Amino acid sequence: MTMADLWWWPYAMIVIAGWLATDVWRWLGVLVSGRLREDSELMIFIRSVATALVAGVISKLVLFPAGALESAPVLLRLAAAASGFAAFLMLGQRVIVGVLAAEVVLIGGWLLLGGS
Amino acid sequence: MRSAVSIPALILTAAFVGYAGLARESGLTLDQTLMMTGLVWALPSIVVLTGAISGGMGMISAALAVALASVRLMPMTMALMPLLRVEGKTKRWHLMVASHFVAVTAWVFAMRNVEDLPREGRLPFFLGFGASLTGFVFCMTGLAYVMVGSLPPMVAGGLFMLTPVYFLCSLWGASRISADKAAMLAGLILGPVFFLLAPELDLLLTGLVGGTVAYVGTRLARRGWR
């Protein structure tokens, strides 16, 4: 039996790898606010790493999704995400526009391809 | 309270509804899903943690990946706190409590709106706004988790699509300098590459390699070789 089979393991993961690993940055932000400049080179580097990591999550969610989205063809998923982002950029950078455009392409394409 | 019912709040709720489907498919229980929503309260970190738990990642690499995904909360908190504080009056632990509500949606909203309020009213406003938003999203996530099993695949698939597109747009919207945008592009390309090459450490590598390339590249463009 490995650790991952214990019933409390996911809860321990949520508290330590989830809650503490997230809130520690918020607390640090409170503690150093006013001391470390937000536009310092260190902050720019840290933000780059964080942004690249979250961007990696985005493309994984589109290319290797879990669950129901798997049954949509990968090209359709890519087209939906790309047209959502394009609509977001072209129509005044409003998130709602991007989200709606992506959903229209995804669901419309899925219907055209005869999905269920 | 009225601010909690706004377009960004609705999009965020929809993204969490989509996440509820992902959590369920990943084998998380309802109480685990809700616990993450309440305790972590930053969707990218929640999605990373979900992948870590369902993929059987160890505690240390999971904590590192989540910490890396959450690091942007620090500069965000740093930027917001001076707006909420009344010099010499606000207790630090009040700000620590309020900081839990810092996440992309609440932060963008607060940065845009608190400056219209008198200084004394800002922290109470942010606490009330954060708590109502979290509470509402919490309930909707639970409801969605229970309902998602009975949705037709196309609707469930549409919900899953919400999260990445929401991230894509809000990450771009939150980026201010070329380094952020270059990092986003690098991460989008490297994410799947490292997922195929090193599925255990893919997010850490994507962040570190993509972030470093983006930082160094844009720094050279800014300042030249020196």
Image: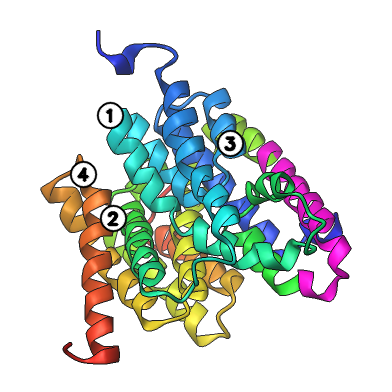
Q: Which residues are magenta?
A: B114-139
Which residue carries the number 3 mark? B39
Mark 2 and mark 3: Cα distance apart in space: 28 Å
The percent coordinates of residue B199 (x first, y second) are: 19, 43
The percent coordinates of residue B128 (x first, y second) are: 81, 50
The image quadrant of residue B135 is top right
In the image, farthest residue toward the top: A1
Which residue carries the number 1 mark? B58
Same chain for the residues at labels 4 and 2, yes or no? no
Which residue carries the number 2 mark? A63
Which residue carries the number 4 mark? B201
Mark 1 and mark 4: Cα distance apart in space: 11 Å
> Is the C-beta separation of discs 4 and 3 under 8 Å?
no
Whether residue B189 is visible: no
Same chain for the residues at labels 1 and 4, yes or no? yes
Instruction: Determine the secondary structure under disc 1.
Output: loop
Q: Chain of mark 1?
A: B
Whether residue B75 is visible: yes
Please tell me which of labels 1 and 3 falls first in the chain: 3
> Which class describes the residues within 10 Å of circle 2: few (<14), some (14-19), or many (20+)?
some
- Nearest the viewer among B211 and A36 is A36
Q: How many marks?
A: 4
In the image, farthest residue toward the front: B88
